[in-house]
Structures are given as C-alpha cells and as structure tokens.
Image (cartoon, helix red, strand yellow):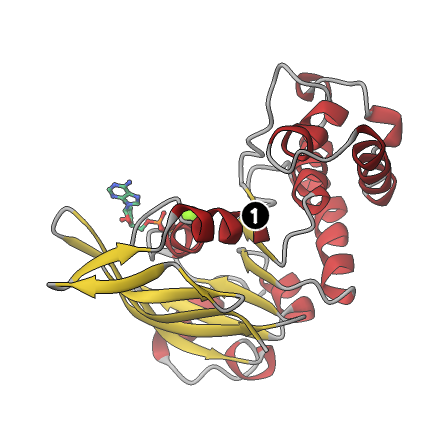
C-alpha cells in the first residue's frame, strides 16, 4: 500500500520553476531518502507534502487522500478543510532547526499538540508523553527548556514531539545538519531505530553512509528534477547518471 503518491508535481516561486515534474511513491513501512545539492528543491518537496507550500500542478496523495480535489482552468483546487486537516494530522515533520517552542519545557513541547490539536484527555497525554520521553531517552530532561539542551537533545525532542502524534508518515528535513559533528550520531541512531520499526519516512539528508544503511529507496535530485532513483545498491553503490556520480564523489574518501 502506498502511503505517499507524488504525481507529476510542479512548483514555481515567481517565474522560477523549482520543482519540475516530480513523481515518486513511498509504501507503508518504507524509508525514502532524498539526496541532492543545495537548492535542488528537496525542502520544497517536503513542504509541499506537508501542505506548507502549494503546488501548481500534479497531485499529492497521502493514505489515499488527495491534497488537490480537482483542477479548474488549470488551477489546482485544494481539498476541503476537513480532509486537509486529516492529512495534516497523519503527516509529521521534523525540521533542521528543531522548531521547538522556546517558552515550553520538553514535556510541554511534546504535549502541546496532543492537548490542543488532538484534544486527548489528561491520562492519555501523560501516557503518550511518558512513552516517547522514554523511547527518546529524554525522561531526565522533561522539565528542561530548549535553551538548556544540547542540539542532539533538542532534535530528539523534535522527533519525540512528532512521534507523540503517531503520524502515518514522518518527513525529516536535514535532521542533523545543524548539529555539531559529535552530536550527529545520537540523532541518526534514533532515526535508524524508527526505520527498523518500519515507520514510513521521507528523509532529506547529506549523510550518505547513513542513507545507504537505512533507505529502502534513494532519490537523487538536482535542479528540481529526479535524476536517478532506486535502492541504495544502485543509486549510491552503482550510480548511472553523471550528475549522481559527481555529487557522490564529494562524499567518498
Ligand atoms: P534544497 O532543500 O534542496 O536546498 P529548497 O527546496 O530549499 O532546496 O529550494 C529550492 C529553490 O527554491 C532554491 O533556489 C530556493 O532559493 C528557492 N526557494 C525556496 N523557497 C522559496 C520561497 N519561499 N520563495 C522563493 N524562492 C524559494
Ligand atoms: Mg533544504
């Protein structure tokens, strides 16, 4: 079963074509890793999937629900609010810069959406937040504020907050790019576990070795287009396209 279907999407900012006819699918339990040079449109794709940006053409279907209901005179008409809300609840996002609420503690950051968006009761909230705090090794930090955490801990809170909502799809945009090198490992380990648990994920990263280890499928993009996609054994170990080879050269010693 496909959790995500991205069908021929295009996206312009002004007159600049940023996403130029991209299609891919992610099946339940799969991890898709998107790699590619800076400015190639990787974040924009994740933002379109999360409905943080609107697409100009094509469609995105998440768990069978379409973002775009129909086209009228070539203009996309997005689905009604209820469906978009459902899609939104089923799709989690982990950001490069964590996007934590600075005035809330770790526990409050995790519980915010459970309380105000999902409107869970007190017991449920307590159970869920305790579970994810334990899972992410953050129980001892539950009453700390983000400013008193290391970058690695902050990103683990970002991931915990996402998991608390039990999304059917998790998107991560360069989750380790703003971390000091010595803190990257602890976050990659968490993500690796999620992949082993067969969470459905789309991860943008420059950690090529990590991508090779955890991805079911790699998508290499440049200039808003998919240059090459397939299992890591093909795209990373045995790339066919010159642009993929050039890109990967920078990551091999
Ligand atoms: P990547 O994540 O691969 O580095 P992005 O998706 O962030 O690439 O950006 C792709 C291109 O789109 C870049 O040239 C960027 O400058 C441009 N872009 C991204 N967001 C906006 C925006 N909100 N307005 C105008 N241009 C944008
Ligand atoms: Mg980006």
Residue in the picture at 48% in, 74% down: 25
Where residue 170 appears, as percent x and y from the top left, is: 60, 54
Question: Quick one: quadrant of the N terminus?
Answer: bottom right
Where residue 155 appears, as percent x and y from the top left, is: 66, 37
Residue closest to the eye, 204 or 201: 201
Q: In which quarter of the image is residue 156?
A: top right
- Left-right relation of 72 to 173: left
Q: Residue 71: in sight, yes or no?
A: yes
Residue in the picture at 73% in, 33% down: 153
Which residue matches tag 1?
A: 89
Q: Residue 50: in sight, yes or no?
A: no
- Left-right relation of 134 to 36: right
Where residue 99 appears, as percent x and y from the top left, is: 55, 31
Where residue 161 appears, as percent x and y from the top left, is: 68, 38
Question: Quick one: quadrant of the C terminus?
Answer: bottom right
Q: Is residue 48 above or below residue 201?
A: above
Residue closest to the eye, 198 or 125: 125
- Left-right relation of 128 to 222: right
């Amino acid at each position: 079963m496909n959790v995500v279907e991205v069908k021929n999407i295009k996206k312009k900012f002004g007159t600049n074509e940023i996403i130029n006819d991209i299609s891919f699918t992610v099946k339940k339990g799969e991890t898709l890793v998107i790699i590619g040079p800076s400015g190639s449109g990787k974040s924009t794709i994740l933002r379109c999937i999360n409905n943080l940006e609107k697409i100009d053409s094509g469609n995105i279907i998440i768990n069978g629900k379409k973002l775009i209901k129909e086209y009228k005179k070539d203009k996309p008409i997005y689905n009604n609010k209820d469906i978009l809300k459902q899609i939104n609840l089923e799709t989690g996002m982990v950001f490069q810069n964590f996007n934590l609420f600075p005035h809330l503690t770790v526990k409050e950051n995790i519980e915010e959406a459970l309380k105000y968006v999902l409107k869970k009761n007190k017991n449920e909230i307590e159970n869920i937040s305790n579970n994810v705090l334990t899972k992410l090794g953050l129980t001892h930090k539950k009453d700390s504020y983000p400013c008193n955490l290391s970058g690695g801990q902050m990103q683990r809170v970002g991931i915990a907050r996402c998991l608390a909502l039990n999304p059917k799809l998790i998107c991560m945009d360069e989750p380790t790019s703003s971390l000091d090198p010595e803190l990257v490992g602890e976050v990659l380990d968490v993500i690796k576990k999620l992949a082993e648990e067969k969470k459905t994920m789309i991860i943008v990263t420059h950690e090529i070795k990590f991508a090779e280890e955890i991805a079911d499928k790699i998508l290499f993009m440049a200039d808003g287009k998919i240059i090459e996609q397939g299992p890591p054994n093909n795209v990373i170990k045995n790339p066919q396209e010159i642009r993929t080879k050039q890109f990967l050269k920078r990551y091999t010693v």
